[in-house]
């Protein structure tokens, strides 16, 4: 059920600031707006008196969290039941003001969080974009935050590395940041020896460290393992790191990989300026009633060994979708003809292909694309956003879409102009299925 839907003009773009789906509420694509259809709130930008009052980014964050409160209330839940946050920023300088507001909003009990830097957002003057997922409280479905001592968190961030709700486990975005601050910025176990040109591969060292020293201990806190991971988002600052990352990823998930999306950040992109990667995960509880089920609808994947999607109870998580063929190259159907350059545009062709493929996966999993609860679009150029929205309207006429759209420097597949990360609800699914 869309929450507080609006139509954004020009373009007749139907947007859902929130979605209530069974036991969950999703708020996606939130910005410092005073309504969900306009530009940035005047009090945030205030060009006539920009230094009067609170810092601009504090005001921007306050507006975002005020809007979150509206969505949570409309969905029948509250800030105490938020299970996950995803934050994207234009630059590092905006983060401290945002963190101040976030700590106040959650009274210091911040849920698992992922933060990284990106290239461009949809609104003029926008410095941050935030997504949220919350539980609707119910029997055996309460939120519990976990703060294991072997996963230290900066006081300024204040988030919990691990959170559980029912049969689901949420782990915050993990980087190769040093476990002991004085040994940083990158942990000694994740960096090349000083003065050596070759003593390991940086992305492999960081990935291995994150998995062994952060993800595994986080999951062990609640008696889960890597085999229980159903969804991973992996942020990389260098697209050329993808093959080496995938080597390490496949070694740790030889038989039961999660649905995985690889997203390019700005450079630098993470809390550690020299860091190369951040990984967040959603899992099911080890030994719990909710099981991890692989979905195979015959849809090509961008990277060898990846699954198309994972079903976990009432949620379906797709791996990152790009318009590829069975060899991981740009599909023939979406390539423009150099002899007819004005017949079709890359974003229309690719989005049409992607949504058709997504629908195949949804049907195989026992649902439909109309039950979408979270849409993240990563564009190589935000000039393509309106064209992408038009394709959504062709597939789901007049349905408000819970979208976030940001611009990234590049995508892993040559010629790809858009990457989709989609989460879908499976309605009428009993808990534990």
Image (cartoon, rainbow, N blue to C red):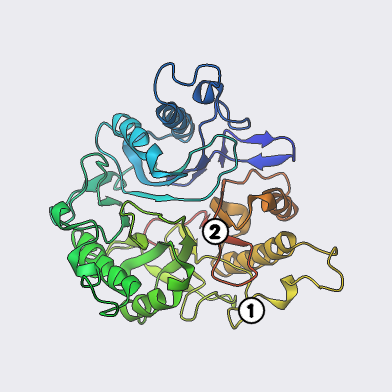
Which residue is rendered at x = 44% and y = 34% of the image?
Answer: 72
Q: Classify mark 1: helix, strand or loop.
A: loop
The answer for how far apart the CA atoms under marks 1 and 2 are is 23 Å
Along the line of sight, the residue nearer the viewer: 221 or 342: 342
Residue 271 visible within the image: yes
Q: Quadrant of the C terminus?
A: bottom left
Residue 171 visible within the image: no
Residue identifier under label 1:
325
Residue 163, position in %: x, y?
A: 27, 50
Q: Quadrant of residue 9?
A: top right
Q: Residues within 10 Å of mark 2 (few under 14, many from 20)?
A: some
Which label number is shown at residue 285? none
Which label number is shown at residue 409? 2
Residue 290, position in %: x, y?
A: 35, 62
Q: Is residue 110 above or below residue 375?
A: above
Which residue is rendered at x = 12% and y = 53% of the image?
Answer: 149
Q: Classify mark 2: helix, strand or loop.
A: loop
Which residue is rendered at x = 36% and y = 75% of the image?
Answer: 249
State which mark lies toward you, 1 or 2.
Answer: 2
Q: Quadrant of the N terminus?
A: top right
Q: Residues within 10 Å of mark 1 (few under 14, many from 20)?
A: some
Q: Is residue 38 above or below residue 220?
A: above
Count of marks placed on residues? 2
Residue 144, position in %: x, y?
A: 24, 46
Dot 1 and dot 2 residues touching (CB under 8 Å): no
Q: Quadrant of residue 230?
A: bottom left
Residue 404, position in %: x, y?
A: 55, 47
Q: Is residue 139 above or below residue 334?
A: above
């Amino acid at each position: 059920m869309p929450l507080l839907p609006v139509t954004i003009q020009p373009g007749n773009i139907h947007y859902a600031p929130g979605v209530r789906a069974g036991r969950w509420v999703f708020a996606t694509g939130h910005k410092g707006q005073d309504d969900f259809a306009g530009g940035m709130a005047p009090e945030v930008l205030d060009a006539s008196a920009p230094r009067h009052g609170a810092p601009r980014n504090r005001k921007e964050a306050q507006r975002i969290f005020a809007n979150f409160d509206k969505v949570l209330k409309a969905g029948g839940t509250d800030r105490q039941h938020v299970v996950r946050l995803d934050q994207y920023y234009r630059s590092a300088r905006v983060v401290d003001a945002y963190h101040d507001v976030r700590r106040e909003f959650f009274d210091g009990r911040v849920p698992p969080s992922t933060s990284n830097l990106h290239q461009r957002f949809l609104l003029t003057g926008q410095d941050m974009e935030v997504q949220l997922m919350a539980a609707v409280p119910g029997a055996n479905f309460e939120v519990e935050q976990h703060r294991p001592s072997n996963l230290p968190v900066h006081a300024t961030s204040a988030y919990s590395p691990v959170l559980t709700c029912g049969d689901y486990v949420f782990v915050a975005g993990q980087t190769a940041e040093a476990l002991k601050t004085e040994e940083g910025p990158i942990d000694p176990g994740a960096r090349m020896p000083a003065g050596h040109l070759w003593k390991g591969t940086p992305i492999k060292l960081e990935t291995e460290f994150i998995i062994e020293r952060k993800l595994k201990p986080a999951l062990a806190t609640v008696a889960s393992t890597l085999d229980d991971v159903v969804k991973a988002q992996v942020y990389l600052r260098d697209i050329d790191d993808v093959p080496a990352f995938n080597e390490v990823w496949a070694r740790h998930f030889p038989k039961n990989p999660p649905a995985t999306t690889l997203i390019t950040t700005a450079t630098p992109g993470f809390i550690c300026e020299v860091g190369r990667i951040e990984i967040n995960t959603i899992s099911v509880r080890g030994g719990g009633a909710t099981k991890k089920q692989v979905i195979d609808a015959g849809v090509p994947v961008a990277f060898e060994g990846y699954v198309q999607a994972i079903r976990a109870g009432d949620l379906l998580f797709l791996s990152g979708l790009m318009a590829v063929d069975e060899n991981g190259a740009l599909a023939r159907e979406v390539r423009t003809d150099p002899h007819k350059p004005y017949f079709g545009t890359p974003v229309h062709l690719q989005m049409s292909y992607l949504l058709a493929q997504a629908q195949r996966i949804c049907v195989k999993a026992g649902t439909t694309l109309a039950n979408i609860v979270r849409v993240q679009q990563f564009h190589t150029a935000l000039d393509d956003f309106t064209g992408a929205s038009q394709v959504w309207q062709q597939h789901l006429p007049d349905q408000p879409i819970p979208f976030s759209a940001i611009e990234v420097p590049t995508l892993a597949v040559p010629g790809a102009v858009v990457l989709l990360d989609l989460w879908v609800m499976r309605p009428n699914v009993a808990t534990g299925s």
